Amino acid sequence: PSNQAPSPPPSPIKGEGGFGLFARPSRNPMNILWLKTDIIYPPNTGGKLRTYWILKELSKRHNIIYCCFADGENDFPGIQEMKSWCAELHTIERKPREEKYTPRFYLDLARNFLSPYPYAVSKYYHPRLTARVKDLLSNGKIDCVVCDFIFPALNMYWDSQVPRLIFCHNVESLIWRRYVENHRFLKKWFLYH
């Protein structure tokens, strides 16, 4: 027997390992399906900045399969940038929703009145995005799915056995609670019930 101490286990942060959901015992890259509502380039908001830099780093060791909505020519430069480091980029063409407090906004709220889901989530549901996610998961090559913020969550394919994570950088429930507490009753009722 050797009187040398055993080697320490590899660091959970250094090298190919990682930690938590992304821990891998080998050097094989993971296929990560990332679901978000929009193109994240240019990274000009807090949420886009966070996601952009996380994905840029993850893409150095793993395959990022990114799914989102896109607004045609307006998103073209961002799509080209993201294609340079995403293994796959899947977009569903969709024009942005009307600005808040316009007649169209109130029409959308009224249409959502009988929905069991909050307007802030249901406005991002799209059957074509849901179908795309389901198709990608059905090929058996996806190792995990990350739903970036709560907004695209209705487009997740929940019957899959692939590990799923909803990733929020805010305490969303606290933000919504403060918002409701600071608005008139009618707005509270329409937006959150």
Image (cartoon, rainbow, N blue to C red):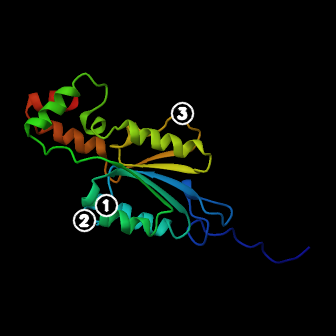
Number of numbered discs: 3
The answer to which of 126 and 175 lies nearer the viewer is 126
For numbered disc 2, what is the local secondary structure?
Answer: loop
Quadrant where the C terminus sits is top left
Q: Looking at the image, which residue sits at the far front?
A: 73
Disc 1 marks which residue?
48
Q: Which residue is mark 2?
A: 44
Q: Amino acid at mark 3?
A: Asp
> SS of the residue at dot 1?
helix
Q: Amino acid at mark 2?
A: Asn
Residues marked 3 and 2 touching at CB (< 8 Å): no
Q: Residues within 10 Å of mark 2 (few under 14, many from 20)?
A: few
Q: Residue at x 57, y 43 (%)?
A: 162
List the residue tagged with mark 3: 159
Crowdedness near tag 3: few (<14), some (14–19) or many (≥20) residues, C-alpha within 10 Å = few
Q: Secondary structure at mark 3?
A: loop
**Mark 1 crowdedness (10 Å alpha carbons): few <14, some 14-19, many ≥20:** some
Residue at image position (11%, 39%) is: 182
Q: Is residue 39 left or right of residue 64?
A: left
Q: Position of residue 84 (x, y in %)?
A: 44, 70
Q: Nearer the viewer, residue 148 or 107?
A: 107
Q: Between marks 3 and 1, how big is the CA–CA gap?
A: 28 Å
Q: Is residue 88 left or right of residue 17?
A: left
- Residue lying furthest top in this view? 114
Q: Position of residue 38 (x, y in %)?
A: 32, 53
Residue 5 against residue 37 in the figure, above or below:
below
Q: Amino acid at mark 1?
A: Lys
Residue 83 position within the rendered picture, expressed as x and y whole percent measured from the top left = 43, 65
Q: Split into 4 quadrants, where in the image is the N terminus?
A: bottom right
Q: Pointer 1 and pointer 2: residues touching (CB < 8 Å)? A: yes
Q: CA distance from mark 1 to mark 2?
A: 6 Å
